[in-house]
Amino acid sequence: MTDDAASTRPEVFIALGSNLGDSAAKISAAMDRLTEFADGPVRRSSLWRSTPVDCPPGSPPFINAVVAFVPAPGITPEGLLAYTQAIEKEAGRVPKRVVNEARPLDLDLIAWGDERRDTAMLVLPHPRAHLRRFVLEPLAELAPDHVLPGRTVAVADLLAGLPRDPGLRRLGGDREKPWKPTLRP
């Protein structure tokens, strides 16, 4: 791919989450699988442990991350959604029985460039991404100045306006790093 071709195609952001089984391994494997749909490198955030949001009582903590990439030629948002759902199923995800129940893998298409969609199948950008610290914190590692379609401020500014999550921790090596707000350069 030429640099000109890459610059004319949108960058895609996908949030990954898991709170069943070996979540870090499931997310890492999913990140590897997503390279199949990228035209060029897949940028990966750190892994983050987060408090479950709007989940049934007693739900285990989540491991979250975000990836960013330029989709391969011919891949559409709906096609990528189908691929991500297949990856979830391969990881053991079953149809929901309870809203926001624990799951082995959850992949959410957060944004596809400036694309906006609102269909029964797909809503772009993700309708709650701007409200979720567990999405914005890893997204800010990759694209702090990115403005999600329909928003007027950058990811880092959205993040700065959210309430703190005392359970949010960046995972790395043998120790966890406590949450610190993302600062804009």
Image (spheres, rainbow, N blue to C red):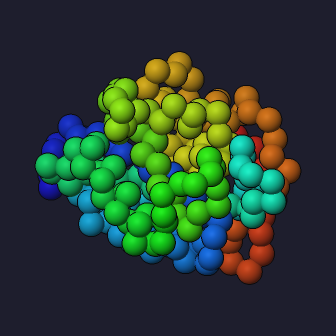
Report x, y in % for residue 110: 46, 42
Please state if 177 lies on the left or on the right of 66 as rendered. right
Is residue 182 something one can see in this rendering? no
Up the image or down, 51 lies above or below 155; here it is below
Residue closer to the observer: 61 or 180: 61
Report x, y in % for residue 129: 56, 37
Please state if 94 lies on the left or on the right of 163 as rendered. left
Q: Residue at x 36, y 37 (%)?
A: 122
Q: Residue at x 52, y 22 (%)?
A: 151
Exactly how many numbered labels are in the figure?
0
Report x, y in % for residue 35: 32, 65
The quarter in which the N terminus is drawn is bottom left
Up the image or down, 136 lies above or below 161; here it is below
The quarter in which the C terminus is drawn is top right
The quadrant where residue 162 appears = top right
Q: Residue furthest right?
A: 166
Q: Residue at x 24, y 49 (%)?
A: 79
Report x, y in % for residue 50: 73, 56
Please state if 140 lies on the left or on the right of 146 as rendered. right
Q: Residue at x 61, y 78 (%)?
A: 22
